[in-house]
Amino acid sequence: MGKAGSGAGEVKEGGLTVLRRHLVDMARLFDRGWQLLRHRGPSQIQFWFIALAIGTAAGFAALVFRRAIEVLQAFFYGSPDVNRLHSFAETLPWYVVLLVPVAGGLAVGALLHWFTPDNRVRAVADVIEGAAINDGRVEKKAGLVSALASLITLSMGGSSGREGPVVHIAAMISSWVSNLIRADGITGRDLLGCAVAAAVSASFNAPIAGALFALEVVLRHFALHAFAPIVVASAAGTVINRLAFGDVTEFRLPGTTTLEFYLELPAFLVLGLVCGLVAVVMMRAVFFADDVENRLQRRTGLPQWARPALAGLLLGMIAIPFPHIIGVGYETTSMALTGQLVLHEAIVFAMLKVAAVAITLAGRMGGGIFSPSLMVGALTGLAFGTIATGMFPDSSGAGTLYALAGMGAVAAAVLGAPISTTLIVFELTGDWQTGLAVMVSVSLSTALASRLVNRSFFLTQLERRNVRLAAGPQTYLLAMFRVTGVMRPVMDEDAAEEDACHEMIAQGLFVPTNATLETALPVFDKSGVAFLPVVKMVDEVPILQGALYHVDALKAYNRALAATAAEEHS
């Protein structure tokens, strides 16, 4: 009995040992998988599921943001139909039209003053910066405040678009996921692209354009490894849009957009050039207004929190006689695309919209620029088409076709995205029969506008903040490396001699610890030295921290260029 009991106990103990070993092996396998996911990124199949989840979350975020705008606009303006806001605003007392934007500006100013370090709303430019130099991450606290500020702006008379806020909201979702799995730069950027694609698709029911927008505008490359998950996420965003709104286009066109191909194409070439100039005027108007308001603040001591309120006052004053400027302007855009406006109305509304957008964005009220550029483009195209078809009635198609082409041409030039903008125009209107006219106008407008600004509105915004992405990675990668990360510390066995470093410091040959390779490499080129002392200034006294060798700086730069090229061609 003792032996039998002992044998049973041994069997039981042996079974527990095997079970324990299996559990330990499973735990090790899970831990290994988790480490691989964190440090090497997910496998292709895993990544597609993550892309689907991010796309779904970003799509719902865009849907909630859009619904919130509709609810708040209905509350503040009493309009039962957000797509007919300006028609309803015409019936309101003048003081309501004046005071609602002022109240919105005060609320936005208070939010930005209390919860952001620089009183600035985050939008698409910040997402592009995050993709280029922050491993696909964006600010989350400032981003949440910016989303709320943009929601107030778009609901209370601001003249901007909703694509900027939803793109940044989506980027915050992907940043949270990237931080959760500790994704590297490539994975983080791919997840960011997935989120942006889904947000754009969910906002405009434009799955093809959403995917290409993420690649063309945000990631700024078309690497094959990113294409499939971005398409998956874009499809998820589109499904959410169609579940909420049905399979309908944003704009409905008359059935008369026919092109007299050979005779009419030169007119669309000219339209492209005109739209390129209009886009440049629109972009420069925003930057000019921003500079004017900056000077006004410095000279008058205007508080930062009052800047959006001042912008709201100016918008309210314009909106009293011209409520067309309120909000994203879809009603006016639809009227232009269907030919319901006469020539002088198209010209005046386009000019006023440019002024209103400049006031809104320079006033730091929030929102995007894509939807306003669609409105300005449609009005420009309609005005041009009215003149062209009036001059050559026998060899011209419908005037509304020019509005469609102008809408794409101005928007493409502003975004610096001819491919995705061309497709989004088709998906917004459902008109795929006029592709040649739109493509011709878009190509000319973007070619012209990119020569007169730093490629696009967003890249010019970043350039004004000294974030130089327009020139390509060979320029902005230098700004990513601080000299402290590349230098050889004082105690390093390969460090430079301290006496030699102090002699160079006395001659003024050194770089501070907060400098980047963008600052250091020109000093090497000018001086011809092999290394530069790196110093920390303490009470204006330089304290030696180490030495930056020219060869080390070039090696770090070359490795970064090689990694970027490998990502973009993988």
Image (cartoon, rainbow, N blue to C red):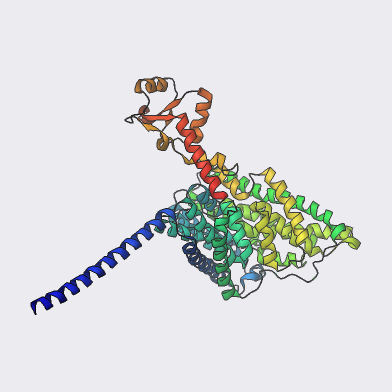
Farthest residue to the left: give it: 2
Where does the image place residue 262, in percent across and percent down from the top left? 86, 58
Picture coordinates of residue 464 (x, y %)?
57, 43
Q: Which residue is drawn at 65% across and 44% down?
A: 453
Q: Nearest the camera: 391 or 415?
A: 415
Left-right relation of 41 to 370: left
Image coordinates for residue 474, horizontal then vertical, percent: 56, 39
Q: In which quarter of the image is residue 167?
A: bottom right
Name which quarter of the figure residue 38 lies in. Answer: bottom left
Question: Which residue, as the protein is rendered here, is positioned at the far bottom?
Answer: 1
- Nearer-the-camera pick, 496 or 417: 496
Which residue of the protein is positioned furthest toward the right in this rendering? 394
Question: Is residue 543 shown left or right of residue 9?
Answer: right
Location of residue 541 in the rendering, given as x and y in whole percent from the top left corner = 36, 26
Residue occupying the point 45% across, 24% down: 509
The residue sitting at 34% across, 60% down in the picture is 31
Residue 319 visible in the displayed image: yes
